[in-house]
C-alpha cells in the first residue's frame, strides 16, 4: 500500500552536491574495508559496524525515515538467510557427508588411479577439475581447504599444494555454491541472473582455459609445462567449453558443476590413451589403490553425480508436464511489511525492490536438501562390507554440525546483505554509481576492480555482489554501458580477487598445516591475481566498445 510518506532518494542529498553525497555514501564501505584489511577486525564485526554506519548516514544524510532504514536491513538479512544461506548450508552439508562417512578417502584414491601416480596430473584433476566441482556445489572456502589438503596428501610440497588450489579455484568462484554470486548480482542489479551468467560464460573461457598451464608451472616450472601440456590443454578446453555450454543452455546454477565434470571426464579419458613418458621421482604420488571397487567409486562420488541429475531433472524436465514451471509456480512474492510501497527510485517511481521472491520448492537449496537426504539414506543402507558404517541419523547430525560450524558465516552474510539493502534503498549506492559513471567508457576497465577488491577484502564473491551489484548497474546505465557486462565483470573479478583474500589464504595455510604461511602465499599468489585482473579489465573494456561485443548477452 502506497502512503503519503513515500521516500524518494536523491543523488545530491547533501548540499545539492553529487561529489559530497558520494563521498559520504562510500563511508560504510570504506569503514568495512579499513576495519577488515588494516585493523584485522573479524568480518562479522566489520559488517555489523558498517551496517550501523550506513543506517545513520541513510537517516541523517539521505533523509530516509528511520523505520524504513531499519526495515530495509531486515529485508536484506532475510534475503541473506533465504535463499543464499539455505543454499550454502545445504551445499556444504552435502560435501560433509562424504567426509563424515569416510568415503572421501575413496574419492582421493580415484584421482591417484586416473592420474597414473603423477602428482602433476593429479594436481590438474584435484586442484582444477575437482576443486571447481566443489566450488560449484559448496564454495565458501571449502574447495580450497579440501583441494589443498588432498594435494598435500598425494605428495606435493605444502606451499605448492596451497597455491595450485588457490589459483585453480579462482575462475569458478563466480559460479560457486550453485551460482549464488550470480543470483545475488542479478537480484540487486535489477536484471535477470541468466543474462549475467551468460555473459560470464562467454568471458571466463578466455581466461580459464589457461589455468591448468599455470598449475603445472606452479608445481614443476617449465619442465612440468613441457611434459604435461597436452593434459593441461584438454582440462582447460573442457572447463572453458563447460562454462560456455552451461551458462548458455543449462540452468546457470549448474555451470561450474557441469564444466568441472566435463573437464574431469575429458582429462580422465585422455589419460587412458596418453601418458607422460617418465615421471620424475619427486612427482610420484604417495596414494595407493587400496582395493577400490566400482561400487565404492559410485558411492564415493554419489553426492556429485546425483546433484547434477536432480538439478537437471528439476530445471529441464518438460515431457508430459513442465516441471520447472510447476516448481516456480509455488514461489511466493512477499511485499515486505511496512516497506513495500513506501520507497521510490531516484525517478520517483515506486520501487519493486521491496518485494521479495520467496522460493521454496524451486530453490537450489531444496534440490541440494533432497540430494543430501538420498545420500544419507544410501550411505546408511550400504556400508561396503562394513568398511564405511553410517546411518541416516548421522547424516542429519552432520547437517546440525554444519549449521553450527557456519554460525559466524551466517551472521556475516545476513549482516552484509542488510548493509547492501540499506545502502541500495536509501540511495547511497546509486549516488556512488552516478558519480563513478562520470568516468564514462573508462569505467568498463575499472568495473572488474570493484569485484576484485570486494572479494579480496571480504573473502566472498557473494559479498562483493551484495556490496557492488547495484552500483555497477547504476554506473552502467549512467555511462550507457551494458549492465550485464559490468555485473559479469564484477563477479569474475571477485573470483580473481579471492586468490589474495586473507581469509582464503588463511584457509589454505591451515589446510596444508602451516599456519602463519599466509604472507608467503600472498607474495606467490599476488602476481597471478594482478595479471588476471588486468586482462579481465582489458577484455571488459573491449567488449563495452563493441570490439568484443559478442561476449555480451543483454
Image (cartoon, rainbow, N blue to C red):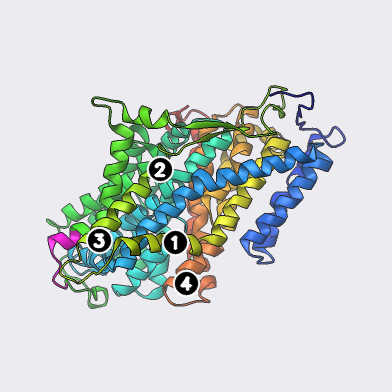
Q: Position of residue 46 (x, y in %)?
A: 67, 59
Q: For the residues marked 1 and 3, what is the alpha-carbon distance in whole angstroms?
A: 18 Å
**Residue in the image at 59% along x and 50% along y:** 414
What mark, if any, has residue 509 been given in the picture? 4
Judged by depth in the image, the label closer to the viewer, 2 or 4, is 2
What mark, if any, has residue 379 been given in the picture? 3
Judged by depth in the image, the label closer to the viewer, 3 or 2, is 3
Q: Which residues are magenta?
A: 290-297
Q: For the residues marked 3 and 2, what is the alpha-carbon distance in whole angstroms?
A: 22 Å
For label 2, the residue is 364
Judged by depth in the image, the label closer to the viewer, 2 or 1, is 1
Q: For the residues marked 4 and 3, what is the alpha-carbon distance in whole angstroms?
A: 31 Å
Q: Looking at the rendering, which quadrant does residue 482 occupy?
A: top right
Q: Sequence-wise, which precedes: disc 2 or disc 4?
A: 2
The answer to whether residue 271 is left or right of residue 172 is left
**Residue in the image at 44% along x and 35% along y:** 199
Q: Position of residue 458 (x, y in %)?
A: 58, 56
Mark 2 burial class by Cα count in 10 Å: few <14, some 14-19, many 20+: many
Question: Given the current orientation, which residue lies at the most extreme front position?
Answer: 393
Amino acid at each position: 500500500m502506497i502512503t503519503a510518506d513515500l521516500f524518494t532518494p536523491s543523488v545530491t542529498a547533501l548540499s545539492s552536491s553529487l561529489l559530497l553525497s558520494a563521498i559520504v555514501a562510500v563511508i560504510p564501505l570504506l569503514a568495512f574495508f579499513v576495519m577488515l584489511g588494516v585493523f584485522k577486525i573479524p568480518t562479522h564485526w566489520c559488517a555489523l559496524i558498517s551496517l550501523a554506519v550506513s543506517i545513520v548516514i541513510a537517516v541523517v544524510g539521505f533523509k530516509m525515515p528511520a523505520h524504513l532504514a531499519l526495515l530495509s536491513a531486515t529485508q536484506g538479512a532475510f534475503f541473506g538467510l533465504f535463499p543464499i544461506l539455505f543454499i550454502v548450508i545445504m551445499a556444504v552439508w552435502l560435501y560433509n557427508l562424504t567426509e563424515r562417512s569416510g568415503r572421501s578417502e575413496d574419492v582421493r584414491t580415484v584421482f591417484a588411479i586416473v592420474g597414473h601416480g603423477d602428482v602433476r596430473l593429479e594436481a590438474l584433476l584435484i586442484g582444477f577439475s575437482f576443486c571447481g566441482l566443489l566450488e560449484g556445489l559448496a564454495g565458501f572456502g571449502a574447495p580450497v581447504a579440501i583441494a589443498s589438503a588432498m594435494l598435500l596428501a598425494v605428495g606435493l610440497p605444502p606451499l605448492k599444494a596451497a597455491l595450485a588450489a588457490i589459483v585453480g579455484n579462482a575462475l569458478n568462484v563466480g559460479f560457486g555454491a550453485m551460482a549464488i554470486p550470480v543470483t545475488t548480482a542479478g537480484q540487486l542489479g535489477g536484471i535477470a541472473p541468466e543474462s549475467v551468467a551468460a555473459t560470464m560464460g562467454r568471458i571466463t573461457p578466455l581466461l580459464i582455459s589457461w589455468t591448468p598451464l599455470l598449475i603445472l608451472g606452479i608445481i614443476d616450472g617449465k619442465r612440468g609445462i613441457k611434459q604435461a601440456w597436452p593434459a593441461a590443454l584438454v582440462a582447460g578446453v573442457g572447463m572453458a567449453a563447460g562454462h560456455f555450454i552451461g551458462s548458455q543452455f543449462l540452468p546457470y546454477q549448474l555451470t561450474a558443476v557441469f564444466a568441472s565434470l566435463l573437464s574431469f571426464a575429458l582429462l580422465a579419458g585422455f589419460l587412458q590413451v596418453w601418458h607422460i613418458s617418465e615421471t620424475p621421482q619427486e612427482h610420484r604420488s604417495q596414494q595407493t589403490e587400496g582395493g577400490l571397487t566400482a561400487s565404492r567409486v559410485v558411492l564415493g562420488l554419489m553426492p556429485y553425480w546425483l546433484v547434477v541429475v536432480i538439478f537437471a531433472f528439476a530445471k529441464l524436465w518438460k515431457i508430459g508436464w513442465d516441471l520447472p514451471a510447476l516448481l516456480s509456480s509455488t514461489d511466493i512474492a512477499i511485499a515486505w511489511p511496512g516497506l513495500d510501497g513506501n520507497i521510490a527510485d531516484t525517478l520517483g517511481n515506486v520501487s519493486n525492490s521491496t518485494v521479495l521472491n520467496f522460493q521454496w520448492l524451486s530453490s537450489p537449496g531444496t534440490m541440494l536438501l533432497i540430494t543430501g537426504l538420498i545420500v544419507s539414506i544410501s550411505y546408511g543402507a550400504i556400508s561396503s562390507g562394513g568398511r564405511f558404517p553410517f546411518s541416516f541419523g548421522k547424516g542429519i547430525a552432520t547437517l546440525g554440525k554444519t549449521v553450527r560450524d557456519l554460525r559466524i558465516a551466517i551472521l556475516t552474510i545476513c549482516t552484509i546483505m542488510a548493509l547492501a539493502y540499506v545502502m541500495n534503498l536509501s540511495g547511497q549506492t546509486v549516488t556512488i554509481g552516478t558519480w563513478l559513471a562520470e568516468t564514462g567508457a573508462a569505467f568498463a576497465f575499472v568495473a572488474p576492480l570493484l569485484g576484485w577488491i570486494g572479494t579480496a577484502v571480504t573473502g566472498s564473491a557473494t559479498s562483493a555482489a551484495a556490496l557492488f551489484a547495484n552500483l555497477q548497474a547504476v554506473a552502467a546505465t549512467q555511462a550507457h554501458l551494458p549492465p550485464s557486462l559490468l555485473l559479469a565483470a564484477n563477479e569474475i573479478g571477485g573470483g580473481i580477487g579471492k586468490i589474495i583474500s586473507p581469509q582464503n589464504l588463511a584457509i589454505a595455510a591451515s589446510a596444508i598445516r602451516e599456519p602463519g604461511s599466509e604472507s608467503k602465499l600472498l607474495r606467490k599468489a599476488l602476481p597471478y591475481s594482478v595479471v588476471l585482473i588486468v586482462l579481465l579489465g582489458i577484455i571488459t573494456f573491449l567488449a563495452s566498445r563493441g570490439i568484443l561485443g559478442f561476449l555480451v548477452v543483454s
